[in-house]
């Protein structure tokens, strides 16, 4: 009897790409991954070269108790700085992972550069090395936190764990290669300035690959910058941009500050009250504060109202259906950075 069906299976395992690639990820994944691997490769080489200079700065007696104590102190100070940084940054990693991925790359380069200076100033080994380690901890925290948010946006099939695992294998392979080339360059760096030249080359590759890779990231969550870009284009053409179109216009390396300040702790005497928020104008700034029971869509519409009041124009956005149709996530906007809210008092409390 002939079978009624055929069993289809595959013994091929993919160690570097998520299962069902490319359907399981967004179309920008490959471009982002290529630059990310180049960035990891160059960062490993930078780490090798800067650590080599740290050891040279300690001198021939680098295994003495004094040198070991200095090394422990600089690690402790660096880790403490990382803890303070993570605690003060909070959910801003989710709000703008592109910016914090850039911060990760930039702080790593600055940290390695500071470590590179230690042979020139051996008497200042401890403060220089401590600052360098602190920067590396900030880089690691920014990198891991932003990476999680970026991976979440890259998923197409709820395959975050798989994508993260394959990212780890990619990173490990790239870092091993970077460590090898960094060690090779360190071996042939017969003088300090030759080593510094190698360092400069890897640093340029690292920063450029990070910047180019960020360009492939599309975020469909709304923060102040992305919402401003959307509203400006909507006012001009009546068109709602996609996440890909907005991503190309986003500012990456420089923090963005709009004209609407959200969550002011000041008590305003003059303000206008709208549904779930108040708006107080101060020159060319609109202060927007949400009521304690304001929900996600109330925040977005309140922000739109603040822009209308500030610029004296109407965006004619009655609902957020058009945003959702273009793929924007309106259920979790990042429009309340310090979570400051207000509650109106009744007559007995006044």
Image (spheres, rainbow, N blue to C red):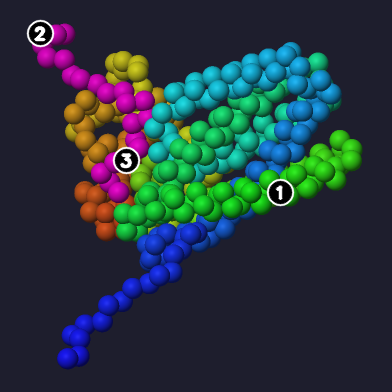
Q: Nearer the viewer, mark 1 or mark 3?
A: 1
Q: Which residue is mark 3?
A: 333
Residue 172 makes an appearance in the image: yes
> Regarding mark 2 in the picture, which secondary structure is present there?
loop
Which numbered disc, 2 or 1, marks the residue that appears first in the sequence?
A: 1
Residue appearing at x 65%, y 43% in the figure: 43
Q: Which residue is mark 1?
A: 180
Per the model, the C-alpha gap separating discs 2 and 1 is 72 Å
Q: List the single residue furthest toward the front.
A: 1
Q: Position of residue 219 (x, y in %)?
A: 41, 50
Q: Are marks 1 and 3 in contact (CB under 8 Å)?
A: no
Q: Residues within 10 Å of mark 3 (few under 14, many from 20)?
A: many
Q: Is the residue 282 above or below the residue 162 in the image?
A: above
Per the model, the C-alpha gap separating discs 1 and 3 is 43 Å
Q: Main secondary structure of the magenta part?
A: loop
Which numbered disc, 1 or 3, marks the residue that appears first in the sequence?
A: 1
Per the model, the C-alpha gap separating discs 2 and 3 is 35 Å
Residues in magenta? Answer: 329-350
């Amino acid at each position: 009897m002939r079978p009624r069906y055929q069993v289809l299976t595959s013994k091929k395992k993919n160690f570097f790409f998520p299962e069902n690639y490319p359907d399981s990820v967004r179309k920008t994944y490959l471009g982002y991954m290529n630059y990310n691997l180049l960035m990891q490769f160059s960062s490993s080489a930078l780490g090798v070269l800067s650590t080599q200079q740290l050891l040279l700065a300690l001198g021939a007696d680098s295994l003495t108790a004094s040198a070991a104590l200095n090394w422990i102190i600089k690690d402790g100070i660096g880790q403490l700085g990382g803890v303070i940084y993570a605690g003060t940054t909070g959910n801003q990693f989710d709000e703008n992972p592109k910016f914090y991925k850039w911060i990760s790359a930039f702080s790593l380069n600055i940290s390695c550069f500071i470590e590179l200076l230690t042979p020139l100033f051996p008497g200042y080994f401890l403060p220089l090395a401590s600052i360098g380690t602190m920067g590396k901890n900030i880089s690691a925290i920014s990198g891991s936190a932003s990476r999680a948010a970026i991976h979440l946006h890259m998923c197409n099939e709820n395959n975050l764990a798989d994508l993260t695992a394959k990212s780890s294998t990619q990173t490990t392979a790239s870092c091993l290669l970077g460590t090898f080339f960094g060690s090779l360059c360190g071996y042939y760096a017969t003088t300090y300035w030759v080593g510094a030249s190698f360092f400069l080359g890897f640093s340029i590759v690292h920063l450029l690959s990070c910047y180019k890779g960020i360009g492939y990231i599309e975020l469909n969550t709304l923060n102040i910058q992305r919402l401003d870009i959307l509203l400006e284009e909507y006012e001009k053409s009546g068109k709602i941009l996609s996440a890909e179109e907005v991503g190309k216009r986003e500012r990456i390396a420089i923090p963005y500050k709009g004209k609407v300040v959200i969550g002011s702790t000041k008590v305003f005497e003059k303000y206008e009250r709208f549904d779930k928020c108040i708006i107080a104008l101060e020159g060319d700034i609109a202060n927007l504060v949400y009521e304690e029971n304001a929900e996600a869509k109330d925040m977005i519409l309140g922000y739109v109202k603040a822009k209308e009041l500030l610029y004296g124009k109407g965006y004619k956005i009655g609902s957020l259906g058009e945003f959702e149709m273009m793929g924007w996530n309106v259920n979790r906007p990042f429009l309340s950075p310090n979570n400051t809210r207000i509650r109106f008092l009744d007559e007995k409390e006044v």
